[in-house]
Amino acid sequence: MIEQLKNKKVLLAPLAGVSDTSFRIICYKFGLDGAFTEMVSAKGLYYNDKKTEKLMYIDKREFNTGIQIFGRDIEIMKYIVKEKLNYRNDIKEISINMGCPAPKITKNKEGSYLLKEPQQVYEILRDLKKVSKKDISLKFRLGYDDQNINYLEIGKIADDLKLSSITLHARTREQFYSGKADWNAIKKLKENVKIPVFANGDIFSVEDFKNIISLTNCDGVMIARGAMGNPYIFKQIKDFINKGKYDYLDPVELIELIKYHYKLELEFKEKKLAINQMRKHVGWYLKGLKNSSKIKNKINQLNDIDDIFKQLDNYKKDLERI
């Protein structure tokens, strides 16, 4: 089994509001092979939107980060690739998103809506591949809904165009994140294309990683929700691949990790924003720990980093006594 896992890549999925620079740095620290920025609007970049531009920042501590863009206007997307992405040496790959299920994306006929339009998918990917100096990859879903499952058709388009890889989130758009991901579909896709295939959906543990590789023989995995509150999953997977065993992060070490995450956020964001955005991360990190609700509630009411660290240190002492 271990031999089958050798050379399988472990990636972090683009996660809006989660996979920012700080979180990506932490995941790389734990052995991540590659990541992508949060999903970036091609239209937003075209109109020089400052918030959109900020999403493209890649730190020198990241060694294999790509940009994920979404859109449907081919001319705008080509312009962005040629004028804003091609010259960036820090960008390793451009991922095209055709999987986002959010209504604000699909109402503009972008993201997973494009699965309804295979011809548009073909033209977008064909034209971007022509103008890009970077690898072009695709992330997509099984189809728009159960009545329109067309992942093999979309995968074949990507294969014929020789994209660098494809990642299948094995749910439909209508499922959003509910139900179970259909890993058998990933297996079928892998059997029907020549380009590398990455598996996405319901990978929350080393066991899930082993099982999905065993079933699909895909070229690697892209972890999304499984990394939220647990970037240590990348170290666990790498340790299992390299040593055949892995450990768990000690709760006391987890508190230090949270503090490190705060410090990274403060490097890149204004204090108030950093503290506000860390609240969700703290909730994920502490989930399941003894008395975690009490400490989360306290931290959520604090706006000073020293006060937050004091609460975390006190909680660490409590955990050490358990």
Image (cartoon, grey):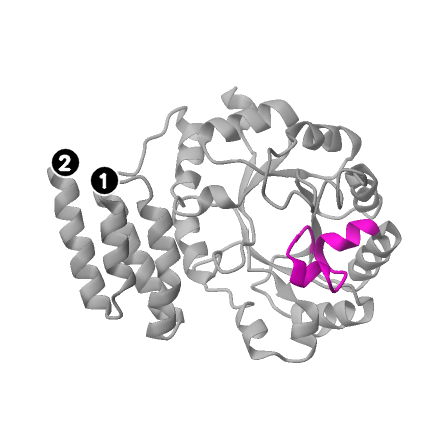
Q: State the quadrant of the C terminus.
A: top left
Give the farthest residue toward the top.
Answer: 1
Instruction: Residue 108: say if magenta.
Output: yes
Residue drawn at the location 16% of the way across and 54% of the way down? 313
Amino acid type, residue under disc 2 in the picture:
Ile
- Eye-nearest disc, 2 or 1: 1
- Residue bearing the label numbered 1: 290
Residue 159 occupies which quadrant of the picture? top right
Label placed on residue 322: 2
Nearer-N-terminus badge (2/1): 1
Label placed on residue 301: none
Secondary structure of residue under mark 2: loop
Left or right of 50? Residue 142 is: right
Left or right of 76? Residue 22 is: left
Instruction: Residue 112: say if magenta.
Output: yes
Amino acid type, residue under disc 1 in the picture:
Lys
Vertical position of residue 180 compared to residue 126: above or below: above
Q: Position of residue 78 (x, y in %)?
A: 78, 68
What span is colored magenta in the figure?
Answer: 97-116
